[in-house]
Amino acid sequence: MAIVETEKKGEIAVIRMDNPPVNALGHALRVGLERAFAAANADAGIKAIVLTGTGKFFSAGADISEFKAEMKEPFLPQLIDRIEQGSKPVVAALNGTALGGGLELALGCHYRVASKDVRQLGLPEIKLGILPGAGGTQRLPRAIGVEPALQLITAGSFIDAQKAAAAGLVDKVVEQDLLPAAIAFAEQQAGKPPRRIGEKKIEPGTFAADAFHKAKMQIGRHPSGPLAAKAAIAAVEAATELPLAEGNQRERALFRELAASPYARALQYAFFAERQAANLPGIGGDTKLREVNTVGILGAGTMGTGIALAFLNGGFPVTIVETTQEALDKGVARIKDTLSANAKRGRITAAQAADRLAKLTPSLEMADLGPADLIIEAVFENMALKKEVFGKLDKIAKSGAIIATNTSTLDVDAIAAETKRPQDVVGLHFFSPANIMRLLEIVRAEKTAGDVMATAMAIAKRIGKVGVQAGVCDGFVGNRMLAAYGGEVQAMNLEGAMPQEIDGALEGWGMAMGPLAVSDLAGLDVGYRIRKERKLTGEAAQNARIPDKIVEMGRHGQKTGAGYYKYDENRKRMVDPEIEALIRGEAEALQIKQRPIPADEIVERSLLRLANEGAKILEEGIALRASDIDTMYLNGYGFPAWRGGPMWQVDNVIGVETAAQRIKAYEAKYGARWKIAPLLAKLAADGGTFAALDAKKK
Ligand code: CAA
Ligand code: NAI
């Protein structure tokens, strides 16, 4: 089928878009639509037009990959204006997802009917750091009212057909076959003057006088960065003051400003980086996946229960096994509590919560994991225990089952070697809380089979996670980089930056939470135990002094009401002079002369340590691509998506050459921990970038 096809049904022209995979409105589709509408309008035998899509998509919007290049005519706003201005009524038959430019196209049509199964209608441009740029900010408030439009546009959220009908966005929800219903609807409109949303005037009394002020006050730390939400609100405000053509111009001007910002570029990069991570070199899209319908989990502690929830929420039946009745009961209670809390908050219905809980089978018998297609081990982080458990699982698991470990630091090759089927063993490194955090580090051990990797990647998607491949090394990708960054934070502590200054600088820059506040949340005792086991020496031992002392004071973080900070009963963090005194005392004992460290230095040192370690990881082949590293940081470590990730920052903001110079300068000042990654030095010397390196691998 051509990209756009017109079929005549009596006096109705049915124009169908077919541009797989998502009907993105790229240049060819825009040209096709323009021609099809011109032809239908010129055809005297046609009285009304139906516009529809194919499969699950009406249209997912503008083609994001075209944003980097100069756009070619017809531009989407022009095309939509022309459709609206047409004299024959146009009915959008929403067969599936209509997002961004796709929904704007539907808003340019005179009527909208939607299949009852449509789930994704919205203007998510804000998530790409831009605003709806094809009349969406002008037509949506005219269609559904100012406040609901502001809400939908600034959140970038989706609504389904039923909600859209209640809001006035959709004229009719169709229970049966969409197309005949849309044609019947068009026949009723034939010969009547079209209803053009763009001609509607928004009357002052129809929205609260302070609606825009309120919306601006609510922006806070917006996930799109500092510009987009503000601009989107201004564009909607213009819709209440200006006729469509002028409002559209205002929207366009704001759109251009945003599109040129580094934040929009970062968010668009993040969109494609996330999707690219699913492509595993050497493992084709035609790889036959292993069938995974049932999941078994060993260990019902913090991670085991979180992982169980993630799979229950994804619709899988889960068997969870513990060693004692007490531990099992505790784990099951945690799962139950989380499900009922989600139901209370309205995130799921009570029936869904009950259904998910019914799919959970608690057990004290490891043998009950035998029938599971996928088994995930989440017992204590102890190599002897993991080895013992994998030896047993090898005897229990059915043939062809995938056996995964959730270890965060141990050698997956050594664990796999305890089985006679290392090809079936993989690391599935979830992040805490596992039912919430999107990142899933998929650790490919030396012998992990290709179909196991491909299946793990597909499972990640089925449970709403972002899967990214990592190789075997201490800490894999994410935590190994975190260790470098954490070490720098400790050094800055000793050098004179107080916890609130470090966290304040990084949060001010956009991190969801500063590193020391995160440590308090995760529990300081975890790292303490690891450090004691490792018997640190030299600089690492020096850097461990402050966190060790804090733990030895009985301050394990939020759970004990104190760590780097004090916490009140609402877990609000407060600066603690006792900790400041401890930090000063330790520096004095080590004869380190303290100084105030400016916020930009704190941010720079944090970023450069992350990226330098990232470059080493890339060179060792532990991460496949720089964009994979960024995807991990955006989805597992609270790194703001509008900053692109540590590797993107080096390429696009700091500059590879400057980064190399700065790292060398820090090495001269602080020594070995700042040793530059050979790959980064080479890129700087050759005028290269991480992105160019990634592109070569495609
Ligand atoms: N442009 C270009 N490519 C797109 C795209 C778009 N708008 N939306 C999706 N794709 C591509 C993806 O990159 C992916 O490609 P690969 O298979 O090569 O990796 C493919 O389509 C399928 O996408 P997903 O894997 O994401 O499929 P999904 O079914 O899980 O999700 C979706 C589908 C909900 C539409 C999701 O892709 C999505 O959210 N897309 C972005 C929607 C969006 O933001 N639209 C607004 C665009 S900006 C705009 O329209 C500006 C304007 O006002 C003019
Ligand atoms: P946890 O201590 O909360 O839970 C471990 C559970 O395993 C306990 O309930 C224990 O009773 C159970 N267990 C021990 N031996 C068992 C056996 N032989 N059979 C069945 N159950 C057994 O520990 P947590 O935090 O859940 O960690 C589990 C694993 O997940 C570790 O490998 C850890 O490194 C990893 N991990 C932890 C993260 C975290 O933030 N806590 C993050 C990512 C990975």
Image (tube, helix red, strand yellow):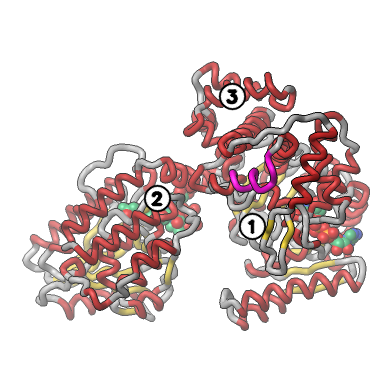
Residue to which mark 1 is pinned: 437
Q: Which mark is residue 662?
A: 3
Q: Which residues are magenta?
A: 497-505
Task: Specify the amino acid type for callout 1.
Answer: Met
Q: Nearer the viewer, mark 3 or mark 1?
A: 3
Contact between labelled residues 2 and 3, with CB atoms less than 8 Å apart: no
Residue with the most extreme top position? 685
| Place of residue 86 in the rendered image (x, y in percent of width and height, measured from the top left) | 12, 63
Q: Secondary structure at mark 3?
A: helix
Left or right: 117 as drawn, with respect to 525: left
**Does the magenta segment cover residue 456?**
no
| Place of residue 458 in the rendered image (x, y in percent of width and height, measured from the top left) | 61, 54
CA separation, marks 3 and 2?
29 Å
Task: Specify the amino acid type for callout 3.
Answer: Arg
Residue that appears at 88% across and 50% down: 552
Q: Nearer the viewer, mark 2 or mark 1?
A: 2
Q: For mark 1, does the 10 Å Cα neighbourhood hold few (<14), some (14 to 19), or many (20 or more) residues?
A: some
Residue 60 or residue 150, whichever sits in front:
150
Task: Specify the amino acid type for callout 2.
Answer: Leu
**Does the magenta segment cover residue 500?**
yes
Residue to which mark 2 is pinned: 227
| Place of residue 375 in the rendered image (x, y in percent of width and height, measured from the top left) | 78, 59
Left or right: 412 as drawn, with respect to 263: right
CA separation, marks 3 and 1?
33 Å
Q: Earlier in the sequence, mark 3 or mark 1?
A: 1
Q: For mark 2, does the 10 Å Cα neighbourhood hold few (<14), some (14 to 19), or many (20 or more) residues?
A: some
CA separation, marks 2 and 1?
26 Å
Contact between labelled residues 1 and 3, with CB atoms less than 8 Å apart: no
Q: In the image, is the residue at mark 2 within 8 Å of ligand 1 by its beta carbon?
A: no
